[in-house]
Image (tube, grey):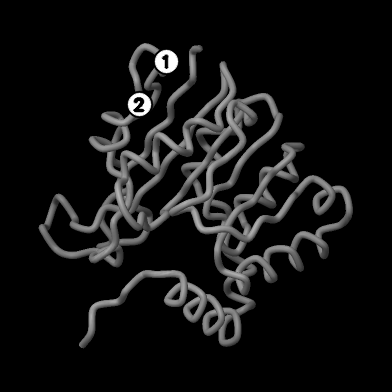
């Protein structure tokens, strides 16, 4: 069996098939629990959802009065997310700007966002470079939130559904951030809710200057 490429075509085909076969299931997926836990106490402002997928985190942020820029390179996922936002009403949809772009090369506007969140993004290249590039978008006093599904379960040594992907880890994310500019508020691995799926790396940092 060939190893997945995890490139743009792979994700576009996966999203197209998933939304064609299980659109209802996707629509019922709740926003990520790490994001809601880490962001709920923050004052709403401008947010970037980098790798927004089907948009559940984007819509949660918009419903909680954030102005959200939502970026993904899957046209199918963005179309689904935009449709879901419109169905939620103008109060939510009007707070979201949808951007089709590849996070391997796309950069946020420097110092523009009060929150930059990137969850479960497969990195095509250097993880530290991607972390630094996303971090440039955070305004002074703002928050960077990164979540990665670890490819191996540390308790069992078994491969997880993220095996073969390159996602952020605590070590790579922390190493990428200048300690003179960033306060690391959370840097830990947390068990995932689904049994036998391993752990997530969760990193939350505040830009000081």
Which residue is at the front of the view, 139 or 16?
139
Q: Which quarter of the rendering shows the N terminus? A: bottom left
Which residue is at the front of the view, 126 or 96?
126
How many C-alpha atoms fall within 10 Å of the one at disc 1: few (<14), some, or many (≥20)? few
> In which image quadrant can residue 138 be found?
top right
- For the point 36% across and 11% down, the residue is 180
Mark drawn on residue 181 = 1
State yes or no: discs 1 and 2 in contact (Cβ < 8 Å).
yes
Q: Which residue lies furthest to the right in this view?
A: 90
Helix or strand or loop: what does disc 1 sit on?
Answer: loop
Q: Residue furthest front?
A: 105
Where does the image place residue 208, in percent across and percent down from the top left? 49, 13
Where does the image place residue 136, in percent across and percent down from the top left? 50, 30
> In which image quadrant can residue 64 be found?
top right
Where does the image place residue 108, in percent across and percent down from the top left? 57, 40
- For the point 63% across and 58% down, the residue is 55
The residue pinned by badge 2 equals 177
How many C-alpha atoms fall within 10 Å of the one at disc 2: few (<14), some, or many (≥20)? some
Compared across the picture, whether 202 is left or right of 67 comes to left
> In which image quadrant can residue 172 be found?
top left
- For the point 46% across and 49% down, the residue is 119
Relative vertical location of residue 153 with respect to residue 47 in this rendering, above or below: below
Compared across the picture, whether 203 is left or right of 29 comes to left
Where does the image place residue 31, in percent across and percent down from the top left? 57, 52
Q: How far apart are marks 1 and 2 (CA)?
A: 8 Å
- For the point 31% across and 31% down, the residue is 176
Helix or strand or loop: what does disc 2 sit on?
Answer: loop
């Amino acid at each position: 069996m060939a190893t997945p490429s995890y490139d743009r075509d792979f994700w576009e085909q996966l999203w197209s098939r998933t939304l064609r076969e299980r659109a209802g299931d996707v629509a019922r997926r709740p926003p990520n629990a790490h994001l809601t836990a880490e962001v709920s106490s923050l004052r709403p402002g401008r947010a970037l959802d980098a790798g927004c997928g089907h948009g559940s985190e984007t819509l949660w942020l918009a419903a909680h009065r954030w102005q959200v820029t939502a970026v993904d390179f899957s046209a199918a996922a963005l179309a689904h997310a935009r449709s879901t936002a419109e169905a939620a009403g103008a109060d939510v949809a009007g707070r979201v700007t949808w951007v089709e772009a590849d996070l391997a090369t796309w950069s946020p506007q420097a110092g523009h966002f009060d929150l930059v969140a990137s969850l479960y993004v497969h990195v095509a290249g250097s993880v530290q470079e991607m972390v630094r590039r996303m971090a440039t978008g955070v305004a002074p006093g703002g928050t960077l939130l990164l979540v990665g599904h670890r490819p191996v379960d540390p308790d069992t040594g078994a491969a997880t559904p993220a095996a073969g992907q390159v996602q952020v880890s605590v070590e790579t994310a922390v190493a990428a951030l200048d300690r003179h500019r960033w306060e690391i508020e959370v840097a830990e691995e947390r068990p995932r809710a689904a049994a036998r799926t391993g752990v997530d790396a969760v990193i939350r940092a505040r830009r000081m200057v």
